[in-house]
Image: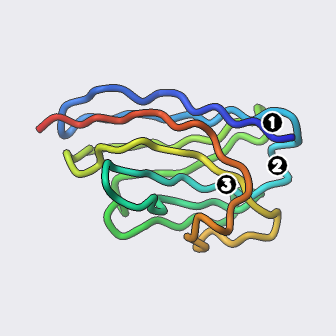
Amino acid sequence: QVQLVESGGRLVQAGGSLRLSCAASGRTFSSYAMGWFRQAPGKEREFVAGITWSGGSTYYTDSVKGRFTISRDNARNTGYLQMNNLLAEDTAVYYCALGSTFLQARQRSPNDYSWWGQGTQVTVSS
């Protein structure tokens, strides 16, 4: 079993910053690649950022490049998404997910990830 719990989401004004956390338990966190996804009302779940199991490679969707940073601390079984210069269009429920050890950071399909957290709400007011 792998359990993931996201935290850090809240209401923030446009231009502000948030750091989301993804705490893992049940299995060794470092054994899995990690991705962040988001889903706005009425829209499909979309890929935001990915990171390989070692943290050696990262990948971002175009809309967040230069603003978001994905990272992980395997010793603490925790992943992060640093979100800077937030825009109203970033409003969504954000999910962390784990996939295969060999999953590449650029693999953006939700079907490539096996374990998901419950999500944390990020609301950006303009």
The residue closer to the viewer here, 41 or 107, is 41
How far is disc 2 from disc 3 in space, using C-alphas? Answer: 9 Å
Instruction: Identify the image quadrant of residue 73.
Output: top right
Can you identify the residue that label 2 sits on? 30
Q: Which colour scheme appears in the figure?
A: rainbow
Which of discs 2 and 3 lies nearer the camera? The answer is 3
Q: Residues within 10 Å of mark 2 (few under 14, many from 20)?
A: many
Q: CA distance from mark 2 to mark 1?
A: 8 Å
Q: Residue at x 29, y 48 (%)?
A: 90
**Viewed as shown, does residue 14 lie left or right of 93?**
left
Residue 46, image x, y percentages: 44, 62
Residue type at numbered disc 2 = Ser
In this figure, which residue is indicated by the disc labeled 1?
75
Residue nearer the viewer, 12 or 3: 3
Q: Which mark is residue 101?
A: none
In the rendered image, which residue does mark 3 sit on?
A: 34
Residue 12 versus residue 126 in the image, above or below: above
